[in-house]
């Protein structure tokens, strides 16, 4: 029986109680979405649930008007993209509960119109973190002073994060056995990533850089050699006594390391995060006239939409009409 507060995207009882499904099938169906996606939808659903409780409205199945009133209240303090994501979470939970097609209130025309109106009013631009560009890397490289293990690890992490355009989650998930060195450089195999829901995997090539101080392949090789790594996580935390842990770094640690060296290089650390590495590669590639398909091959984006944002940002001055006038 459907309960109005249930979050059906996790431990869906409709699946669990379906006697026609094998246990193996049930497990796979309950893992049809990535765990991080489920966590985000769960948080969004709880926000909608709290609003419904305050306004004495039924959350599931909800009336389309309930969702419209919710998103209009939400829009007072939230971005348009946040509003759209909340509606998606509400929709996905209704689908999981069996309210699909025309029975899904989040798909109702009045809800779509409300979201479209909010998008027009507020816009969809999102100010992201500052990119660490190819030209920025030497400034950070100057901060890798000495050859202590923490310094070697941080150097390898930052340079590899940029060169491979890695997401934080991908970077901390890299295993030593996923690495292959060749005369041309380093190949990193990613068994599974955010855009790879089927687990096909992908390989990312990291050529040796002419400038050894910013060469990710050499930095990773030096880190592995000095740390004596054979298998397991490439990037690990240290114990209080300085010994290396077996567990991988958290993705939050990536952001802290990037901020640390941005600060040491004289930048405002609040403007940087783990995503600055991935964004920096894409923006730098655009500045160097790399084609969108070649950028996507390295960043593993499945859609050109985000890549074109990086290209636009990377070429703001390159093809600027005022700049051309100054040069004439």
Image: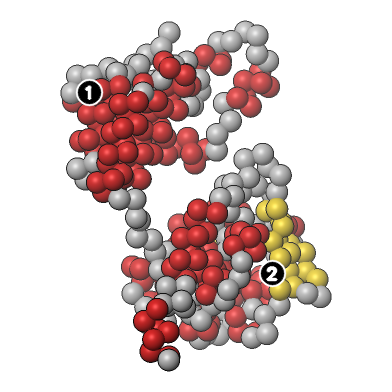
Residue 264: x and y, percent? 41, 80
Give the secondary structure at mark 1: helix
Left or right side of 74 for 214? right
Q: Residue at x 81, y 75 (%)?
A: 183
Between the residue at mark 2 and the residue at mark 1, the CA separation in whole angstroms equals: 52 Å
Q: Position of residue 283 (x, y in %)?
A: 50, 69
Residue 53 circle label: 1
The residue at the far bottom in this view is 328
Q: Name which quarter of the figure residue 77 lies in.
A: top left
Residue 87 can be seen, yes or no: yes
Q: Residue at x 71, y 73 (%)?
A: 207
The percent position of residue 108, horizontal first and vertical second, equals 36, 23
Q: Quadrant of residue 60?
A: top left
Q: Residue at x 65, y 47 (%)?
A: 192
Q: Which residue is mark 2?
A: 206
Rendered location of residue 191, percent (x, y): 69, 49
Residue 239, visible in the rendered structure: no
Q: Which quarter of the picture shows residue 80?
A: top left
């Amino acid at each position: 029986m459907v309960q109005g507060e249930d979050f059906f995207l996790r431990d869906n009882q409709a699946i669990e109680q379906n006697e026609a499904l094998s246990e193996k099938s049930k497990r796979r169906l309950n893992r049809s979405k990535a765990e991080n996606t489920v966590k985000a939808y769960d948080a969004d659903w709880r926000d909608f649930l709290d609003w419904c409780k305050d306004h004495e409205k039924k959350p599931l199945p909800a009336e389309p008007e309930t969702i419209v009133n919710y998103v209009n209240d939400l829009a007072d303090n939230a971005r348009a993209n946040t509003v759209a994501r909340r509606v998606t979470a509400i929709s996905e939970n209704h689908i999981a509960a069996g309210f699909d097609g025309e029975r899904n209130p989040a798909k109702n025309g009045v809800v779509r119109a409300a979201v479209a109106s909010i998008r027009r009013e507020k816009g969809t631009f999102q100010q992201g973190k500052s990119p660490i560009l190819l030209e920025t890397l030497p400034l950070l490289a100057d901060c890798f002073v000495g050859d202590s293990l923490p310094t070697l690890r941080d150097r390898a992490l930052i340079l590899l994060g940029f060169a491979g355009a890695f997401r934080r989650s991908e970077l901390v998930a890299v295993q030593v056995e996923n690495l292959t060195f060749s005369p041309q450089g380093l190949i990193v195999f990613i068994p599974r990533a955010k855009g790879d829901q089927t687990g096909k995997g992908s390989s990312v090539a990291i050529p040796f850089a002419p400038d050894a101080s910013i060469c990710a392949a050499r930095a990773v090789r030096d880190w592995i050699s000095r740390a004596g790594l054979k298998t397991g996580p490439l990037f690990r935390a240290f114990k209080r006594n300085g010994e290396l842990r077996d567990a991988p770094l958290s993705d939050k640690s990536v952001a802290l390391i990037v901020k640390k060296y941005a600060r040491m290089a004289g930048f405002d650390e609040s403007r940087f995060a783990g995503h600055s590495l991935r964004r920096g590669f894409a923006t730098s590639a655009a500045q160097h006239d790399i084609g969108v398909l070649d950028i996507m091959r390295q960043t593993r984006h499945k859609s050109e939409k985000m890549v074109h944002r990086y290209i636009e940002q990377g070429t703001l001055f390159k093809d600027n009409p005022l700049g051309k006038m100054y040069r004439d």
